[in-house]
Image (tube, rainbow, N blue to C red):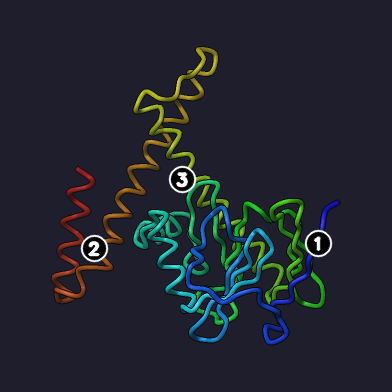
Amino acid sequence: MTKCKTIDLTRPAELQFDEETASFQPSWKNTILMTAYGKERTLVLARDGRCLLLPQPLQKVLDQFASDNGIADYERQALYDWIGVHKGRGYIAGNNRLVPTHGTTNPAVVYYMAYYLYHTYEAGGRVIASFHGRKKRNFQVIIDTGYKTFVRLLQAADDAAKLQLDILAWQMHSYGVKKVHKRQSVRFYDMCSTKRLMCQDLRKRWMLEFCHQVIPDYCTPEECKEIEERVRRYIEK
């Protein structure tokens, strides 16, 4: 029989925690969601049903999560810029998506694993989100955010993930890993041409975003602009 546990994140003071620990490291496999609990701690709902407190600020936990999973900030920003989204960036690795419920500077933001999300609806101006856990555990989470915002940021994460997977498909073909049936070859190669251009454009954005983040610490605005133009010309040769 499936068990369902309700967690109301709109009333954090009333939550009951199983443990405060520094040994739990959030991953794609063990975490449902995470959010700030005050300024110095992070609340984590684990897939096994435990409600944990980590003794680090949310941003520090997110930074470590990104480092563990090879998600560079300049790549993440370039990816979201490519799909035209400039607020509410998640942490994306193909089908693995850690998605925010608000703009990332909002103190009430919750980051959740979209892979385990299976149902949402709106009630009283809040979002009720249901997640699959481990061993037939389900979780119903009450989140203080607008439904339209929730759906928009989830769609942005899905679009970013699709872009990554499209580029991966082209790279697998380019490296000789992906084989295509002859009947599908014309359509597939047309798609590959588009994906190749997408990949090249995204690489350009990665390099320019890297320059944008690093160079200003060492150069004047005029020098930064000149360097970025030289990088752009080099990439587009």
What amino acid is labelled 2 in the image? Cys
> Mark 3 and 1 residues: CB-CB less than 8 Å, in contact?
no
> Mark 2 and 3 residues: CB-CB less than 8 Å, in contact?
no
What amino acid is labelled 3 in the image? Gln
**Pointer 1 residue:** 4
Q: Give the CA distance from mark 1 to mark 2.
A: 47 Å
Image quadrant in which you'd find residue 144: bottom right
Between circles 1 and 2, the one closer to the viewer is 1
Q: Nearest the camera: 132 or 103?
A: 132
Residue 164's disc number: 3
Q: Give the CA distance from mark 3 to mark 1.
A: 33 Å
Image quadrant in which you'd find residue 81: bottom left
Residue 211's disc number: 2
Looking at the picture, how far across and down is residue 35, in whole percent? 57, 74
Image quadrant in which you'd find residue 122: bottom right
The residue under the point 82% across, 58% down is 3
Looking at the picture, how far across and down is residue 105, in whole percent? 50, 78
Looking at the picture, how far across and down is residue 86, in whole percent? 47, 66
What amino acid is labelled 1 in the image? Cys
In the displayed structure, 236 sits above or below 120; it is above
Q: Is residue 79 left or right of residue 3?
A: left
Q: Nearest the camera: 176 or 229?
A: 176
Label 1 element class: strand
Residue sitting farthest toward the top: 182
Looking at the picture, how far across and down is residue 159, in whole percent? 55, 51
